[in-house]
Structure formats: structure tokens, C-alpha cells
Amino acid sequence: MLNQLGFDFGGNAAPSASFVEDVAGTWIDPSFTTAEYVAMFAKADAELLRIVGPGRALFALGIEAAKAEHGKMLARGCVPDGAYRLWRSEFQLSPEQLFAFFDHCNAHTGAAYPGIEYKARDDQRVIVAAMFVENVGTVIVRHWKDVGGIGCDFRPFRVPFFLDSYRDKMPAIEAPYHLWGASYCADKLAYSNDDIASVPAFTIQGRMYLNTGGMGSGEYRECDGWALCPKSDWTGPTYSYRTQCQAWDGGRKERGDKRGLVVRVQGQLCVCESPALIVDRHVAKDVDLYRADADDELVDELGDDPDELPADDENETACDLLAA
């Protein structure tokens, strides 16, 4: 799709799923009173033995960790008179328990069992697996591939991870870092508040994207890319940075979901339509294209080949900065 400025928004790309807000609180852990937590732990203990397979040991560890954390909250006077959210209930696993649980969740994800639910997701850098048992709660485990870190948590309820997430089918796109590294714009978005941020964009595989932040380690770099569409083509709710944060805080959107965020690219109003993880696994160690003050107009022009920029003195200086 070409607009009046000549932007290519990738008209041949598959459209993203329609987006609507969820009910307030959907993406936030629920709150309960002290009496309710005590009753939930008692019920979880009573139901534990009906869990079979590698999940039982994890639930046993998780329930005890949650009861211990709740006891600390009570002892320290950290609970109000009404409902409140439980502290994180982390516990330790052996590598054998970890991978047995991942295999178990992968094998049963998508299966329909009365009162039991599984979900697993590979986010390139982090593998996440969770198991929910009615009247017991949820065990959710994360494994960070690059550093080998493990995080295990228990909640005495069904966690929002089981909801349909924008991350569930997010594609990973391999693309050279020099095409997207300098287009970082998280700072511009954060400073925009209620205004519309003017941001740089980059093009990969015929689609325009924002680089809203990422990470790197060694030769590896990644960023959260958001495909853009013209605002006139967007039919869902729209947000400024502030109203987007309000939707996250209110649990109406999953935290990190930027669908509907309005930005300005070279004067044109655009909307974040769908996410993609942009990855380069072999970046030279001395390459650093991040420039917080990068000129929007110039970075927008990088396109598929930054060497195609006009060779006047101003652009030569900017290219030198990009390669520094």
C-alpha cells in the first residue's frame, strides 16, 4: 500500500488480527483477602495428590513457597484490611525437573483436560511454560537461554499468561543490525506523553517498522519491532504513550502491547499494527548504531541499504556517526 508520501506499508503482507481492549483488570493478577488466601492454600494442599506427572513436585514446592511468602507478608504487617496481591512465590528447580516440566507442557499444550491447562512459548531468548490446575493454581517457569537463568513461580489462581497474547505468534525476522539499530525510538515515545511522537522507521521485507527497544549480548542483537499502517486504515482503539500506559496499568491491555499506538513518521500519522522480533545473531562486536539524537529524516531513509544515502557533506557526516 502506497500513500501520498510514497511510503510502502506492505500491502501484500497478511493483515494482523483485529484488536480490541479487554475488560479492566484482565491482565493483572487478582487480589484476595487473607482469609481467602488461607482457604486457597488449604484447598491446594488437598488437591495436590490428584496431579500426576512431573508437575506434582513443582506444585508441591510452589505451594509451600507461596505459603511462606504470605506468612512473611503477615508477619511484617504488609497486608491491608481488604484484598491484596500476593508477593512472588519463587522456588528452585533442578535442571532435570526444569526440562521434564518443559517437555510435559509442550506435549500437552492445546489438549483439553477437565480442570487442567497447559501453555508453552518460545520467545527466542526466553522459554516459558505453565501448568494450571483448578483449585490448586499455576506453576510458571522461565528459562533464559543466553545466561541459563531459571525463574519458577507459583500462583494460587490461573495467571494471565494463559490468555491470548500478542507475543504468542510473534514472528522472528532475521535482518542486519545496520538496517534497524539506529532507529531506536523508545525514548521519543516515553517523552511524548499525550502528544504524538515523531519517530524514525525502517523497512524490512516490504514493511515499515518501529524499533521500540531491545537487547544485545556478544554478537547477538534484537529489538521489538512494530509494523506500521496508516492511521486512516486502523479501525481499533488508538493511544498516546500516556493513555497506552494507563491501559496497561488498568489491565485492559497486556503490558508491552503497543497495538494502536499513534506515531508520526516524516509527518504522516501511523499506527502500530502488529509485532515482530527483529534479530541479528552475528553483529560485529565494535558496531554500535544506537544514537538517542538520531535525525528522524535521515534514519527513515536508511531503507534496505544505508549506502544508498545521498553523498552530500551532511549525509556523509551522518553516515560516519552511524558507523562509529
Image: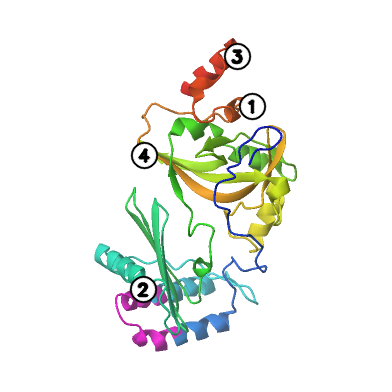
Labels 3 and 1: the sequence-earlier one: 1
Q: Residue at x 50, y 24 (%)?
A: 306
Q: Nearer the viewer, residue 43 or 179?
A: 179
**Residue named by callout 2:** 108
Is 289 or 11 nearer to us in this picture? Answer: 11
- Specify few, some or many for label 2: CA neighbours under 10 Å numbering under 14, 14-19, or 20 or more: some
Q: CA distance from mark 3 to mark 2?
A: 58 Å
Q: Earlier in the sequence, mark 2 or mark 4?
A: 2
Label 1 is placed on what type of residue? Glu
| Marked residue nearer the N-terminal end (3 or 2) | 2
The picture places residue 32, in percent across and down from the top left corner, at 59, 77
Label 4, residues with CA under 10 Å away: few <14, some 14-19, many ≥20? some
Q: Residue furthest left?
A: 96
Mark 3, residue position: 314
Q: Which quadrant of the view contains residue 190? A: top right
Q: Main secondary structure of the magenta part?
A: helix
Q: Is residue 270 left or right of residue 321?
A: right
Q: Give the magenta part as a residue range.
A: 44-63
In which quarter of the view is residue 317 placed?
top right
Side (left or right) of 34 relative to 103: right
Circle 1 sits on which residue? 297
Label 3 vs label 1: CA separation? 12 Å
Q: Secondary structure at mark 4?
A: loop
Between the residue at mark 4 and the residue at mark 3, the CA separation in whole angstroms equals 31 Å
- Could you tell me which residue is drawn at 41 percent across and 89 percent down? 46
Number of the label disc, if any, that sits on residue 265: none
x, y percent for residue 307:
49, 21
Q: Which residue is mark 4?
A: 281
Q: Are marks 4 and 3 in contact (CB under 8 Å)?
A: no
Looking at this view, name the residue that lies furthest to the top.
Answer: 313
